């Protein structure tokens, strides 16, 4: 059976980024993952005070969300996109261990949903 990979993604965005631009960024990421996973548990802190300056800024918008996917290659694409986006000051992507991922309350439901998507689009079997 394929193992569902769970990633925590943290983004620091330029404080001049508007709410609509933040929502647009999240929807673009969700669309990129549409066939291979989902974005869930989105948290936002707007105008978050930083402990130290990042690219000359003392405040930033902080966004944290989880990505659930069976295909790790999509993470490389996201990293490239994050590096090319001038609004993103810094990012961090953390892969959760299988043990920690299984502790997430809705893990099995999400796993079944994404496996269904992957089987349709990529002919992934359960073996």
Image (cartoon, rainbow, N blue to C red):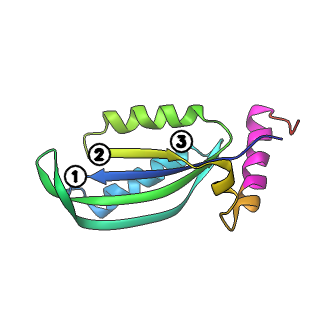
Cα–Cα gap, marks 2 and 3:
17 Å
- Highlighted range, magenta: 111-123
**In the rendering, at what x and y percent does residue 74 appear?**
56, 35
Which residue is at the front of the view, 110 or 116? 110
Residue 14's tag is: 1
Which residue is at the front of the view, 10 or 80? 10
**Numbered disc in front, either 2 or 3:** 2
Task: Name the residue tied to disc 2.
Answer: 88
Asked if residue 119 lies in the magenta stretch, the reply is yes
Q: Secondary structure at mark 3?
A: helix
Task: Name the residue tied to disc 3.
Answer: 32
Chain-order first, disc 2 or disc 3 = 3
Residue at 74% in and 53% down: 111
Chain-order first, disc 3 or disc 1 = 1
The 10 Å Cα crowd at callout 1, few under 14, some 14 to 19, many 20 or more, is many
Instruction: Find the residue positioned furthest to the left.
Output: 56
Badge 2 vs badge 1, beta-carbon distance below 8 Å: yes
User: Horizontally, is 17 left or right of 25 in the view?
Assistant: left
Q: Magenta-highlighted stretch: main secondary structure? A: helix
Cα–Cα gap, marks 2 and 1:
6 Å
* Figure quadrant of residue 49: bottom left
């Amino acid at each position: 059976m394929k193992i569902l990979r769970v990633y925590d993604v943290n983004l620091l965005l330029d404080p001049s980024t508007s709410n609509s631009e933040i929502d647009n960024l999240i929807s673009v990421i969700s669309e990129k993952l549409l066939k291979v996973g989902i974005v869930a548990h989105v948290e936002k802190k707007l105008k978050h005070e930083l402990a130290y300056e990042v690219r000359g800024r003392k405040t930033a918008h902080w966004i944290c969300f989880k990505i659930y996917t069976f295909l790790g290659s999509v993470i490389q694409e996201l990293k490239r996109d994050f590096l090319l986006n001038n609004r993103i000051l810094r990012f961090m992507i953390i892969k959760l261990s299988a043990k920690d991922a299984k502790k997430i309350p809705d893990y099995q439901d999400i796993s079944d949903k994404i496996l269904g998507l992957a089987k349709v689009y990529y002919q992934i079997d359960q073996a």
